[in-house]
Amino acid sequence: MKSKIRVLIVDDSSVVRSLLTHILSSDPGIEVVGVASDPYIAREKLVSLKPDVMTLDIEMPRMDGITFLEKVMKHFPIPTIIVSSLSVRGSETAYRALEVGAVDVVAKPAIDVTKALNQIGQHLIETVKAAARVDMNKHKVVRSEQVVASRPTGSSTALIRTTHQVLAIASSTGGTEALKVVLPRLPADLPGTVVVQHMPPVFTKTFAEHLQKLCPFEVKEAQDGDRVNPGRVLIAPGNYHMELSRSGAYYYVHLHQQPQLHGVRPAADYLMWSVAKVAGANAIGVVLTGMGKDGADGLLKMKEAGAYNIAQDEKSCIVFGMPKEAIDLGAIHKTLPLDKISDELRIQFSKREVA
């Protein structure tokens, strides 16, 4: 019999602790082995209970969650899911937690927490299950690889020649750190790029702003009608699906709030289906680490339309869910370690320009 995933819940709110316990315990594969109201109690329970996964609030008494998480990752690394508020301040702190070593973020609204947490219950359960499969040693390696190489300088191609190309990227659990390995190593005049990273609202804007500091091109949270230009990366905003459209010689993005797909919004499949239809053979698709199957069918449609697709390999993935689904579906041309994807993209940019 397969053992249950043992979870420690750390939150200063007794209401939230009870709700999270109720939600997670409803799944037969999960057991909440302990709760803690602050980091000092949590530290003792980490040592005595040895849980598989920890959920962590980041605004707590006696010691803030980031300081605590840094100590945990140094002495007792454990897959950690941040359960944070949707505020701008909360998103900044949660983003810092991802940098420190958290594997994912789940939003905790400031109003009507009971209703909101029940609505995201299944997503939280799936996130815990994905976190339980994370190899923390591998996670540490990925974070250490970020921007190891100096950022590219200059242009490898003329801006006007990349106008017709589109790069579409899908990622989820572990993707924020993976994108920080891939994107900064691409040329300043990279083709217009569209990204779906599964994140809650507000967090995507914060993430885009941090990526902008690392990259030699523009990175921004997408707004409806934004043009997809060379030298620009558009990140789908949390809670909005993003699709590619074309008017004359130019590509644009369209945002909408159709129902969740695969339990998420934004969903990469919406983006990839539209890229297949609008850009066809002028597109390149990439799927990075993440749980679930989002993006697999869209990448298959892209391949059938003549696009070239790359998947991150199992060894370098934090969660080999999305890439595996795309590979198994026959949607991928080449599977590569995370640190080799940028080099392959540069080759493909040049190859497809002269094709």
Image: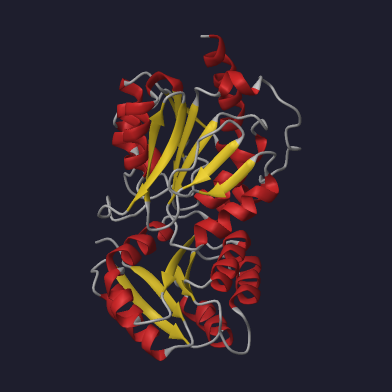
Above/below status of 55 relative to 340 = below
Above/below status of 288 relative to 95 = above
Q: Residue at x 55, y 70 (%)?
A: 88
Which of the two residues, 288 or 349, is positioned nearer the viewer here? Answer: 349
Above/below status of 285 relative to 34 = above
Left or right for 125, reference 220? left
What is the x, y in percent for residue 334? 46, 24
Q: Residue at x 40, y 29 (%)?
A: 247
- Residue 179 falls in which quadrant of the image? top right
What is the x, y in percent for residue 240? 37, 54
Left or right for 164, reference 240? right
Assign the N terminus to one quadrant of the image. bottom left
Which of the two residues, 292 or 27, is positioned nearer the viewer here? Answer: 292
Furthest residue in direction top, as rendered: 355
Q: Residue at x 44, y 88 (%)?
A: 13
Above/below status of 15 relative to 247 = below
What is the x, y in percent for residue 122? 27, 65
Left or right for 105, reference 62? left
What is the x, y in percent for residue 224? 43, 48
Left or right for 155, reference 54? right
- Residue 178 falls in which quadrant of the image? top right
